[in-house]
Amino acid sequence: MDIRKDLLYSDQHEWVRIEDDKAFIGITDYAQENLGDIVFVEMPEVDREVEAEEAVGVIESVKAVADLFSPVSGTIVEINEELEDAPQLLNEEPYEQHILVVSMSELGEADDLMNADDYARFCEEEEQRG
Amino acid sequence: MRFTPHSQAEITSMLQDIGLNSLDELFSDIPEPLKLKKELNLGQGMSEMSLRRHMTDLSSKNIHTGQYPCFLGAGAYDHYIPAAMEELLSRSEFYTAYTPYQAEISQGILQSIFEYQTMICELTGMEVSNASLYDGATALAEACKMACEATRRNQIILSATLHPSYQAVVKTYAMSGKMDIIIAPEHDGVLDLEQILAMINKQTAAVVVQQPNFYGLIEELEALEKAVHAVNGMLIMSVNPVSLALLRSPGEWGADIAVGEGQPLGNPLNFGGPYLGFMACMKKNIRRLPGRIVGQSVDTNGKRAFVLTLQAREQHIRRERANSNVCSNQALNALAASMYLSLVGKKGLKDIALRCHHLACYARDAFSRQGIQLKHEQPFFMEFAVKVADPPQVNRKLLEEGIIGGYELEDALLFAFTEKRSRSEIDQLVTSVGRINNE
Amino acid sequence: MSKLLFEKNVPGSNAFSLPPCDVPEQDIAIPAKFLRQTEMALPELSEVEVVRHYMALSHQAYGVDDGLYPLGSCTMKYNPKINEWAVRLPGWSCLHPLQAPETVQGALELMYETERMLCEIGGMDAFTLQPAAGAHGEMTGVMIIKAYHQHRKDERRKKILVPDSAHGTNPATAHVMGYQVVEVKSNHRGLVDLDDLQAKMNDEVAGLMLTNPNTLGLFEEDIEDIARIVHEDGGLLYYDGANLNAIMGVARPGDMGFDVVHYNLHKTFSTPHGGGGPGSGPVGVKSFLSDFLPQPVLIKEKDGYRLDEDRPLAIGKIHSFYGNFAVVVKAYAYIKALGSAGIREACQYAVLNANYLRCKLKDYYEIPYDRLCKHEFVATGRWQMEDNGVSTLDIAKRLIDFGYHPPTVYFPLIIKEAMMLEPTETESKQRLDDFIAVMQEIAREAREEPRQVLEAPHNTPVLRVDEVQAARNPVVRYDKS
């Protein structure tokens, strides 16, 4: 399982890359592995205001479905439209494909996210719980 | 009668293998106070011969449309059913099968649903269809829910000319608290356009109209379609599938969702069910469509194959996040509908629709010769209402003369004319109504 | 795989003709703007070609009449043929739903009597036959619960409790009806965890939806305590009757404290599943809820039966007419054929068959709760998965090669690699023994020649279907272009 050192992670298996006040948000390798073949991503609308941990979209595989949460508060400023026609990219290159970009309203929220090591431990615990 | 194959010796040996001494021990996990201490009061089991007689006797207490000509419509229609259908529907590979979750041994059922979906799309002029819902009214209620989700609004405007039972069912579904229902008034049997246009606004999730409407009349929808789309709401049409061979389709009107009662397509009247609700929409809303959907794909050898698809919408996967709880549909009735459409074919369906219309026009002229007035002055398809002084009384007398009369409105009777009605039956109806009404 | 109807089309070919028209064929009395402009690409075929088409499709389908169908929670029992005969009587099939009551007394009597028998079987006081399927019954039941609380002005109740082992329809129904779903955990014995239930039950909970026996096939032995906990805080207890076959004639949900129940006539009462429907999901209630039943309500008066539409407290209408009447006719015939003793016996043999199967399979497949079960039990493919990389899905597909329909797989969700087996009472010991031998053989293959299982099925008209492609690029209708 691939966990990138340069990213932050949520307990909902999203990764976050922060550039200035913008948070690029995608799903982790662990998440795509568990979901299986992703067939559809339901995107939120651009300009929508979101609270941290609010459900903003849905990711569907053939046999499972998962809510997509925004780990940070702010305004959605961009969605990755490429995924609408090619959802499999989330399986193929989860860390190259962000799903949305949030212009953060509370920069401090980044401190609540996990670093790579913490996230690796978190995944291990999830595995053991089954 | 029993349908269990066990001999006493087998029961004994099976119990032994389980490590028990009696059948009663199989229920030792049920707390003693909860065990039924008496025999159920269901009577003695009947032999097949007795049951046959009993069912014959009981069903003979009814008067059915095979005995008396039927002029009742109002949502269920006495159309002709081709003989081949009963034979084909008796194939127990179809009727004793479960939902086709195991695609490899269910290609026959999956393909039949794929063909059904295609034909529903053709009829309605829409892009995608599901595999059927319970009936016309529940399909409409599901469509209203779907429109609320798609638009993230909750106001549904129902036309007053929508079937009263359909209005009632949508209102019941609105107990969820997720839909606000308002009724747009009618004028001379059709929508009061001015009023409904004034009701449409940015809270409107959808406007629902029936075509032909409950009184059999044809609604003008052009201005309505423009108005509801101008506020990004949806147009939902509830349509009679046979009428679509003749009338402008929901697709041609610009509807977003088309639903309707599929019973007229080869399904017996059966005292109201099982029927099937069909539902079709445009491709962009396919993932909001409730119920099962069959898709085309390939198998591991690259051969065309069919499979239940988009299952992540459904309750067994989405559970408390699902927007519909539907799982069973009306597969066998949908199969009947596609067999019917295959047997009557493209030309046959047009012929049937035209014949119904011609018979209705003949009846209209005959009524007017008798001095019986139509309730509404609007174009109709195969059903219309005529004014009578005492509708229940007219119906009672018609029944005495061996005719199943019309649907009772306050001051009128709503009559339907299918291709099964003959000129002489219509003449008799018209003469009798004229006479009874003058008595 | 057969060609599609549309690929067999012969333009101009026709299987149907009307009798000559004996009224004037006037011009269409409908303005042109209301007429259809586009063509419909419906089939054009002769009758024999249509018949052959559907015959070919029937050869690629598999029903209970073809063999053992051990789908857990689906109760795929034999569908007696006399019922199919009975339902075709014109006295049923040719009845218009809006005919005058005096012309449909036989139909109303059959419905009334069915309601009475369903009350008796469940220990309930009143029934409606209108729900068209189990999920529709659940929705009706939850509406009744909602109407009851609303009527009492008890507006705080926004939650419905559902066990984690529940059918997906339970949480979906509660959600669709505007409730927040709260999941109750199962304990180590596979039953509702009473502590968790107690912790989650309060005056914001409208009710608990429960299947008993549950989806693991285990009887909820603490049902009296469960009922007490829910009732003490003013909640109602809902019985999902999917598994009624396991207790009918032996115990009754009404006696256990359930306030609202639904049955599945297409499971317990032998009406065929039709390839996915029609079903029928009658709902029964205790007398204090009977005013909330959907209208019309069937009543018996001295001069006959009638449908009462004047029900001020009713939740409303839930169906265009009265539900799937013809399905009810079949269930009625079934109960009449079996009678009191036959109903109980069917239940006993269903439980006997399930336990026999469980005992015979436990050396070959993991059985997470290996104790007395009711009409079904859960085994898993976990050993095969861990030892040989053979999944439950592979085992299911391999069963097809041996002529069996697979069991329900990957449900309940709380068990990994689950397969849920429900043989039903209509399977003989010989059938079960054959099936057991096949399951043992597949377990051997998984160990010794796993490819046989991994690549199954081998003998079907199509092999495994690419579900990912189907879902990514949905093609749901034939398109000539």
Image (cartoon, rainbow, N blue to C red):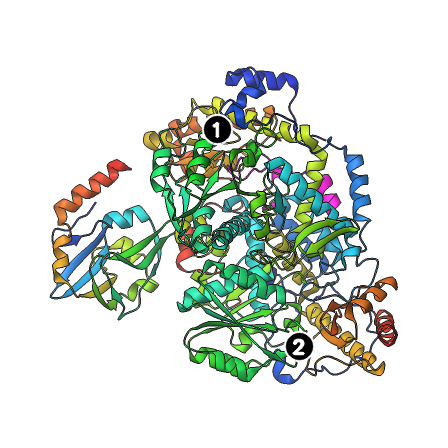
Please state, as top left, top right, bottom left or bottom right, where the N terminus of chain B lies in the image. Answer: top right
- Residue drawn at x 44%, y 51% is C174
User: Is C133 on the left-hand or right-hand side of B68?
Assistant: left
Q: Position of residue B94 (x, y in %)?
A: 62, 47
Q: In the rendered image of this protein, does residue B101 appear above or below residue B426?
A: above
Circle count:
2
Question: Can residue B407 be seen in the rendering of this structure?
Answer: yes
Q: Specify the quadrant of the image occupied by residue B160.
A: bottom right
| Mark 2 residue crowding within 10 angstroms, few (<14) / some (14–19) / many (20+) | many
Q: Main secondary structure of the magenta part?
A: loop
Please state, as top left, top right, bottom left or bottom right, where the C terminus of chain B lies in the image. Answer: bottom right
Q: Which residues are magenta?
A: C59-88
Which residue in the protein does label 2 denote? B217
| Mark 1 residue crowding within 10 angstroms, few (<14) / some (14–19) / many (20+) | many
- Residue drawn at x 65%, y 78% is B189
The chain ID associated with circle 1 is: C
The chain ID associated with circle 2 is: B
Q: In the rendered image of this protein, does residue C75 appear above or below residue B260?
A: above
Q: Position of residue B163 (x, y in %)?
A: 63, 68
Label annotation for residue B67: none
Which residue in the protein does label 1 denote? C439
